[in-house]
Image (cartoon, grey):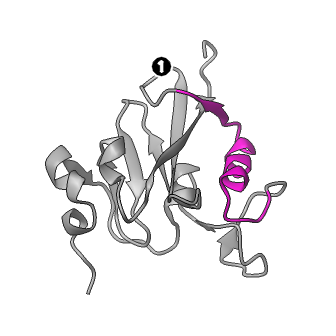
Amino acid sequence: MVKPIEEAFPALAKGGFQITSPVDQRYNCIAFAAGDTANWWWPFPANVREVFWPAGATRAETLAAFHDAFATLGFTECSAEAFQPGFEKIALFADDQAVPLHAARQQADGHWTSKLGEREDIVHNLRDLEGATYGKVVLIMKRPLAGDTEA
């Protein structure tokens, strides 16, 4: 039986969240943060057609490999999670051993959005997903919004 979202992520019940899509197993949180809802992103296995990983990014479950995967899309590391007009941000979550477990994307209105594994997409407060399931936010990256000439 699948746990209710609030049970898996207790802080969401306090901070509030909104479900924005039905359950969809075609893509995961990493793909969703990258803006891809047609593929499942993970660094391995490399020989499985249903799994995508950007060319040039190391195939490993490491923070450096996930950093490099998002760098192929034009993201660079930044220090602040706060909304910054003209930029799109992503946040990588990892466990205590720095193994990446989740990614979220900041929307143009400053809210954060995530795909919960094979479950729904949600809008949420960034830190409300921290905990036993996804670990904590360990890396923020940003890129200029497409078509934004002032960024």
Q: Could you tell me residue 78's position as x and y percent? A: 59, 29
Q: Helix, strand, or loop for circle 1? A: loop
Residue 38 placement, left or right of 52:
left
State the image quarter where residue 49 is shown.
Answer: bottom right
Q: Give the residue furthest to the left.
A: 14
Q: Could you tell me residue 124's position as x and y percent? A: 30, 46
Residue stretch rendered in magenta on the structure: 58-79
Q: Give the residue at x 75% y 45%.
A: 72
- Find disc 1 in the rendering and name its residue: 85
> Up-down: is 79 above or below 39?
above
Who is closer to the viewer here, 19 or 63? 63
Who is closer to the viewer here, 110 or 100? 100
Is residue 133 covered in magenta?
no
Q: Give the residue at x 52% y 35%.
A: 89
Q: Could you tell me residue 1's position as x and y percent? A: 26, 87
Q: Could you tell me residue 126's position as x and y percent? A: 36, 43
Q: Give the residue at x 78% y 81%.
A: 47
Q: Give the residue furthest to the top.
A: 150
State the image quarter where residue 98 is shown.
Answer: bottom right
For the residue marked with disc 1, what is the amino acid? Answer: Pro
> Up-down: is 82 above or below 58?
above
